[in-house]
Image (spheres, rainbow, N blue to C red):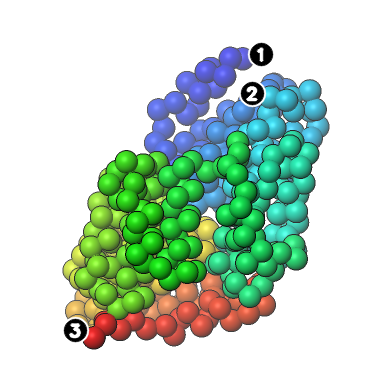
Amino acid sequence: MRNYLEYEFKFFYDLPRGAEKAKGIRKAIDLALEEDDVQNALRLFYEYFTESVIYDDSYEAILAFPEYTALFEKHPEYWDKAYHELLWVYKWISGNCHEFYQISKEQIDSLLENYGSFCDRFNCNKKTYYKNICGILFAEGMDGEVNGVTFEQSYAHLNRMERDELSDCRACELDTKIKYVLFYHDDIERALSLARPLLTGAMHCTEVPHITYVNFSHYYLTKGDFTEAENYADRAWRLLYRDNAQIVSLAEYVGDILLSYAYSDIRKGLAVFKKSFPLCYNVKNGKMLWKYYYGVYHLMKQREFADKQYVKIVFPDRNADFINDENRYTTVQIKEYAYDKLKFLSDKFDERNGNTLFNDRLSVSYTAQE
C-alpha cells in the first residue's frame, strides 16, 4: 500500500487551493481505488470534500458524496478510523445541499435524516444537525419545516445543546450566533457586543471575520445606514481580495459586498465587480450565484441611475448576445444580463421550495435612513 504522502506529492501538494487542488486530489482518489487502497481512498475523499466545500462552490462534493458513503459502508473494517471524517462530510453536505435547486425537498429531508441517524449511530449529539436545519429554513423560508422540525424548534435545540466533536470552530460558531442575533432578533447592540472578539482579531479562522463583516454590512444596508454598510464592506473586501479561491468559495458574500457598494460607493463596487466576475462566473452553486448576481444587478441599476453608461471588462460569458471585440458594454446590458440569471434561479428555487421567496426578493429596494 502506498504511503499517503506519495499521493499528496504526486498529485496535489503544490496546487492552488480550490477547484484546481480538488482535481488533483480526485486523480489521487482514482489511483487509490484502482489499487484497492481503501484506507487512503477514504482519507483522500475527506481532503477532496474539504477542498470543494471550504475553497470552492461545493458542486464536486455534492456529486461525489454517494460514492464516498458507499465506499465507507462497504468497508466496516475502517469505520473506527474513518467515521469521524465521514460525519464531518455529512454535516457539510446536509447543510449545503439546499443551495442547489436541482436537489429536491425530499432529497434534502433525506440527507438531513441520514445525517441525524449517523450522529446517533456514532454517539454524537445533534447540535450541528439542528444548526443545518436552521440554516436551510433561514435561507428558504422560516415558515417551513425540515423533517417536521420548525425553525423555532431547531433554533432552541441549537442554543441548548453543548459543543461536541462535530461543532464548528469557536469563531464560526460565534459568527452563526451573531447572524441570528442580527437578522432573527434584530438586536444590533447585542450583536456588536458578541462580535468583539471577532472584530478585534482575537478570534478568527478561514472564513471569519470575513463573513462577519459582510453580515454587519448587510444588516446596516437593510436599515438604511449606507455609511456603516460601506465601512463593514470595506473591511470584508480587504480580507477577501487577498485570495482568489476565497472570492469563489464566498461568492455569495461578495454579492453582499457589491450590494452595499451599490448604495454607498458605486466606484468601489465596480472595482469589486471587475475583480470578482471572471472568478464567480463559473460558480455552480445556485444560492451563491443568486446572491452574487443580486449584488451585480443592484450595482448596475444604481450606476444606471447615476448615468454611468459603460463598463470596460473582458466579459467571461462569450456566448452573451452582446459580446464585442472592444470589451465595452453598457451598464444596462450587464444589468439585464444579471437580472435574467436572477430570474432563472428565482423560478427554480421557488418551484422547488413551494413559495415565492426568491422572486419576492427581486422587488426589494433599499432607501437611506432619514
Q: Earlier in the sequence, mark 2 or mark 1?
A: 1
- Where does residue 368 sit, x and y in percent of width and height? 26, 82
Residue 307 tag number = 3
Residue under the point 24% across and 67% down: 228
Read off the residue under disc 1.
1
Label 2 to label 1, Cα distance in Å? 9 Å
Picture coordinates of residue 185 (x, y %)?
47, 69
Q: Residues within 10 Å of mark 2 (few under 14, many from 20)?
A: many
Q: Amino acid at mark 2?
A: Asn
Q: Which mark is residue 70?
A: none
Secondary structure found at label 3:
loop
SS at circle 2: helix
Position above or below: 36 against 158: above
**Residue 314 in the image: x percent, y percent?**
29, 61
Q: Amino acid at mark 1?
A: Met
Report the disc number at residue 40: 2
315 and 69: which is toward the camera = 69
Res 87 quadrant in image = top right
Q: What is the distance, in whole Å, between disc 1 and disc 3 at their CAs?
A: 65 Å
Dot 2 and dot 1 residues touching (CB under 8 Å): yes
Q: Is residue 307 left or right of residue 35?
A: left
**Number of on-image labels:** 3
